[in-house]
Amino acid sequence: MLYRGERPSHADFDHGAAEVLSIGLAKGSGGRAGTPAAAQGQVQQPAGVPYVDGFISIRLRHEQSMPLLRIALAAFVLSISVTAARATEIVFLCTDALAPSMRELVPQFEKASGDIIKMTVANAGTIAARLQSGESADLAIVLPPAWDRLQQEGRIESTIRVTLGKVGLGAFVRKGSAKPDISTVDAFKRGVLSARRLGVRDPAQRSPVGTYMLALFDRLALSEQLTGKILLTPHPPYDEVIKGEVDLGFSTLAEIAAEPRVELVGPLPPEIQTYNVFVTAVPVGSKERVGTARFVSFLSSDSSKALLRSKGIEM
């Protein structure tokens, strides 16, 4: 029980003096301080109970105290129930490179805010295509070229764009296997050519990694020599590497670090490295603007950035 001002004494009750009982519940807020009522759903205030200075207050006398106290407590319990039932649900389309980080950050945010994050994981290209087709969401992570295209088409809000980080690409092998040297461009070429088979996610799956790697092989004049040696997979090729179907796979550094069954060979050499930059996109049809703004602010906090760095995401 919370009081504003001076707490009533037992003597006041004994003499029938008028008292004010205040319950710490913002009008229409569902009990969450500092959040607009419209964002959380209205709570019906009992008839005859005045709303004063951010609290529901009851002025009572000794003979009235118990009935009105029961009304006040009933209103308070009802408000908590309404808050739980009307918790903000944020539909979040998360790129797979950020998924390991988000699996830790999302529960932290839900616990702190009371909001619920409904997260779907896909590669950045698939997410952009889903937004382009008009799929409903409150927040998505895309790459800058896709953000620009979606903004020009009027699919996302033009004023909301936050860069959460970037991640480079690397090669990996099955845990315990020999690791080729890929530290320079020439060493990379030798390592790729010496591999029995390479695993790359199929660009047809809108994979930025697969699209870049096939273009890189072309640029390095390796495509002809790699004919028949590249296995295109519908997903990042971890299972294929683990099963021994391919010797060398490629993915983002963050995803490789999150897969305990494989080992990182190394990042691509600086001269041929690329980065996937992750930016927030808020669809124009988002129904939870306030909750989404809270979530983006949380993801931009220093503590969230520290966790992202620990998962291989660069700032």
Image (spheres, rainbow, N blue to C red):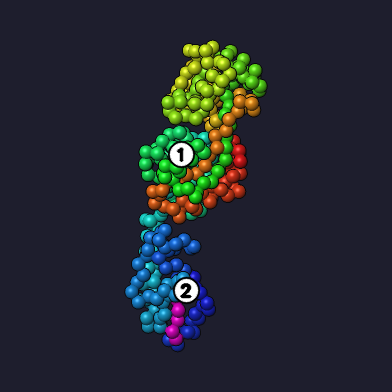
Near-viewer residue (148 or 37): 148
- The CA span between labels 1 and 2 is 48 Å
Q: Which residue is the site of mark 1?
A: 149
Based on the displayed image, in which of its 4 quarters is residue 125 positioned?
Answer: top left
Instruction: Give the amino acid type for the residue marked by disc 2 in the picture.
Output: Asp
The percent coordinates of residue 232 (x first, y second) are: 46, 21
Mark yes or no: residue 174 visible: no
Dot 1 falls on a residue whose secondary structure is helix
Q: Main secondary structure of the magenta part?
A: strand
Which span is picked out in magenta? 17-21
Relative to 253, residue 219 above or below: above
Based on the displayed image, in which of its 4 quarters is residue 65 positioned?
Answer: bottom left
Q: Which residue is the site of mark 2?
A: 53
The percent coordinates of residue 168 (x first, y second) are: 58, 32
Instruction: Give the amino acid type for the residue marked by disc 1 in the picture.
Output: Arg
Near-viewer residue (98 or 140): 140
Magenta segment includes 91: no
Count of numbered badges drawn on the protein: 2
Dot 2 falls on a residue whose secondary structure is loop
Q: Tag 2: Cα neighbours inside 10 Å, few (<14), some, or many (≥20)?
A: few
Considering every residue shown, the one lying at the far right of the view is 184
Relative to 262, residue 136 above or below: below
